[in-house]
Amino acid sequence: MGAKVPGEKCYEDLKEIHIMGLMAIDAVGFTLPNLLLLVGLSFFLGLAVEEVALQEHVQGPGGVRTFPILALTGAGFSILEPVYLSVFSVGLLVLGAWLFIYYRFAVKHPAPTEPPSLLFSVSSLLVYLLGPVVLRQPHWVPISLTVATVLFLGARERLHHLAQTIPISELLTAGKFLILTGIIFPLLPKNPLVPFIPVTPYQVWEAVVIVSSLSYGSYLAQKFLSARRSFFLEAVLGGFYSSTVATVLLARSGNSKKGSSREINSAIVLTNSLMYLRIGLVLIFLNPSFASHFAKALLILLFSGLLVAVFLYPRGGEKVEATPEQKLSSNPLELSSALFFAFSYLVISFLIHWVNVSFGTSGLYVLAGLVGVTDIVPFILSVAHVGTVLPPQVIVLSVMVAASSNNVIKAIYLVAFWNLKEGLSSVLALLGLSFGGLLLVYFSLV
């Protein structure tokens, strides 16, 4: 066949562009439900923006009437030229330039009672972008964007309080941790470097990231809610940070008569019940296939502990002012803490490998009982990571033995830092969770 003449090639290119345009229009999803969703989301966002503007005494372009029109404009422009979105892009540039000019004018000529704010400008840009997002993406995407925006708008005072509570040193610590996580972590070797340590550097730092992230979320919540200290709050945060540390702090509060004994007992049972939820979350993030083996036992222990905590909680009896200890621990993202956890993880992995080779599964169960005196998370992560070597039933029983041993140790801590008489309810609950965990695993494996 001969070469195509320029006219024929140009015609075929135009035809291809026309077909692409038709396909893009079909993909846009120009339907009545989508348009109703777009109007509803933009109206909802306009209500939230105007409410915040009234509270903060700021004024700007856009609101409950303008936002739906702006959203429909963005949707219309995206339909006019759906292939490259050139018309929509020009409209975005024009809108951005106009909002910039408006804001500059407001800064130079501020009203005495209405200071300039970027609230309306940023919200207007988001509403304009909602048009093609609603028409081209699944509904959960624009709904999530809108709801997240409204939540941030409503949490202004709390977010400012959080910014004032967390010092710059801790933000720098979080930044360093993000560098190690986002840049260094993907580059780590995924093959074992030492024959007798069956985990890779990638797996070690993966465990550090998972555990530190859960602990940091609890740490931020502690900072964020520091003005609302209570035994219930300390118990919830401790369950996700370190149930052992939280148990000791709560026992000290009971010894110092800083709260009613029933409330402290309830909080202790609560924080140790949430330990099972923390174990489950760590396993889900690390090895979802093995998490399914633990699901039933962990859920039974979690809800059993929660029921006991509710039963122990005082119902209008003792009225003692709750003044729990000040904090759970230091920032879990500090490099020293992360490196210590990584070192612990390596040591435990080596011990698991050595004990399993030298003494078999019986030795592994003994090791699981011994690690209960420390943080059991490195042991759980190590066992799950060497799951290709150990049978699933051995992993499940080892984890439950470690958790039960840890509860027994915390019962001893309770007696040491408080007293047996007042902390008897917590001691019995911890021993019950320990014995119940072993029974659940035994009967599920037999």
Image: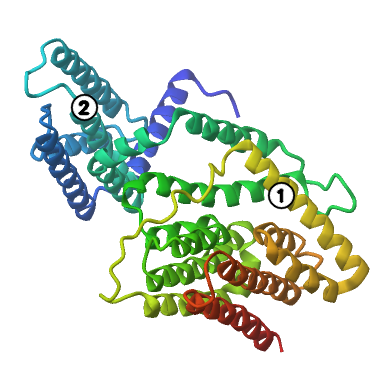
Residue 6 is at least partly visible in this image: yes
Which numbered dot is residue 233?
A: none
Residue at (26, 37) in percent of width and height:
79
- Reading the image, the residue beneath label 2 is 121
Q: Residue furthest right?
A: 358
Viewer-side label of 2, 1:
1
Quarter of the picture containing the N terminus is top right
On the image, the x and y values in percent for residue 378 come to 69, 57
In the rendered image, which quarter is residue 153 located in? top left
In the rendered image, which quarter is residue 433 located in? bottom right
Which numbered dot is residue 203?
A: 1
Residue type of the residue flagged with mark 2 = Ser
Q: Nearer the viewer, residue 393 or 306?
A: 306
Residue type of the residue flagged with mark 1 = Gln
On the image, the x and y values in percent for residue 162 come to 35, 39
Left or right: 180 as drawn, with respect to 67: right
Q: Nearer the viewer, residue 63 or 114?
A: 114
